[in-house]
């Protein structure tokens, strides 16, 4: 579904002025459509818009709008049902796996699907991979299913996300390749006491505060994937965060690649910095 398609279906239900405000930013997670920034000019027409989508896109069962952006300890949104079934749990499919989650209680971005696929393409046979902040386990699932890695460890502090993650590895029959842990990474990683060939840090915000842990538990000549949000004119700041951490902990590093993997707002990008620690 595109903004232009939606405008077409709404042309006889909204005025020309109202059509200019038809939202262009939305995500589809399973059978749920989520408007991330619903315009105030169309609040009185939200039910008409929602019901129009349901009528023309039969795979969509619920329409939600974000009333509060990602916040709190678990970086989850507040969502309101504007049309359809009053449910927020769904099952989506991406990269050959099924992911069950509650879109209001678990942080999840379908826009990262291609980034997860990119990471899979980099993984070599028999690697031990760690995913910090693993959520409902999209990264562990996609990696375990589509690569020849030896094992994937995931650590998540949100108990609801962890519950879904356990359900997901069972549904995808990946219990033998994925090991999941509930708790704070600072407390869990010393208990695991293991070094990894590859560490992913897909935290929505504040990942730089955990670079010290990643540097401590990465094997020599291995790769860390650090995720960050930066202004388009200041992407270099992500590299500076890595440089600062490596200098503090006396680690040599080499930036391999900086990938734009999503847009948070018109001028802010989510980036992934792949860097080698030697």
Image (cartoon, grey):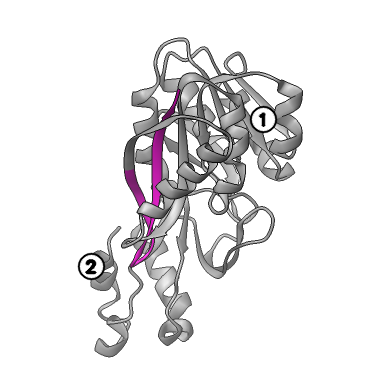
Q: Seen in the image, is 245 located left or right of residue 22?
A: right
Front in this rendered view, residue 250 or 1: 250
Q: Can residue 29 be spotted in the picture?
A: no
Question: Magenta segment: does it hold 277?
Answer: yes
> Would you identify the image quadrant in which residue 23 lies?
bottom left
When asked about the image quadrant of residue 171, the answer is top right
Please name whichever residue, 18 or 219, is drawn nearer the observer in this view of the structure: 219
Range covered by the magenta-colored residues: 259-278
The residue located at (73%, 40%) in the rendering is 184
Q: Is residue 123 magenta?
A: no
Q: Is residue 131 above or below residue 13?
A: above
Image coordinates for residue 77, horizontal then vertical, percent? 59, 61
Circle 2: element type:
helix
Between 193 and 161, the residue placed more toward the observer is 193
Q: Residue at x 47, y 42 (%)?
A: 242
Question: Residue 140: which disc?
Answer: none
Q: Residues within 10 Å of mark 1 (few under 14, many from 20)?
A: some
Q: Which mark's residue is nearer the viewer, 2 or 1? A: 1
Whether residue 273 can be seen here: yes
Q: Which residue is mark 2?
A: 4
| First reached walking from the N terminus: tag 2 or tag 1 | 2
Quarter of the rendering occupied by the C terminus: top left
Residue 93, percent from left and from top: 44, 37
Give how far across and how far down residue 63 sits, in percent.
Answer: 49, 63
Disc 2, disc 1: CB below 8 Å?
A: no
Task: Look at the magenta stretch and give its main secondary structure.
Answer: strand
Q: Which mark is residue 166?
A: 1
| CA gap, disc 2 and disc 1 | 39 Å
């Amino acid at each position: 579904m595109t903004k232009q398609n939606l405008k077409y279906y709404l042309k006889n239900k909204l005025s020309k002025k109202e059509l200019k405000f038809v939202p262009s930013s939305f995500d589809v997670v399973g059978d749920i459509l989520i408007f991330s920034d619903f315009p105030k000019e169309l609040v009185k027409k939200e039910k008409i818009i929602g019901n129009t989508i349901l009528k023309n896109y039969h795979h969509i069962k619920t329409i939600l709008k974000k009333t509060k952006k990602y916040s709190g300890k678990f970086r989850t949104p507040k969502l309101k049902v504007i049309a359809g079934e009053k449910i927020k749990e769904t099952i989506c499919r991406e990269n050959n796996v099924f992911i069950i989650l509650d879109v209001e209680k678990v942080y999840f971005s379908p826009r990262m699907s291609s980034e997860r696929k990119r990471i899979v393409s980099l993984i070599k046979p028999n690697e031990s991979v760690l995913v910090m902040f693993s959520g409902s386990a999209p990264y562990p699932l996609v990696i375990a299913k589509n690569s020849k890695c030896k094992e994937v460890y995931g650590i998540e502090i949100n108990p609801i996300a962890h519950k879904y993650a356990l359900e997901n590895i069972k549904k995808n029959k990946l219990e033998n390749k994925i090991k999941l842990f509930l708790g704070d990474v600072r407390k869990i990683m010393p208990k695991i006491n293991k070094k990894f060939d590859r560490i992913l840090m897909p935290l929505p915000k504040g990942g730089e505060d955990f670079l010290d842990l990643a540097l401590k538990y990465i094997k020599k000549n291995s790769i860390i994937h650090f995720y960050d949000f930066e202004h388009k004119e200041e992407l270099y700041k992500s590299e500076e965060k890595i440089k600062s951490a490596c200098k503090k902990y006396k680690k040599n590093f080499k930036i391999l690649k900086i990938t734009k993997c999503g847009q948070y707002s018109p001028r802010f990008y989510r980036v992934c910095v792949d860097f080698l620690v030697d």
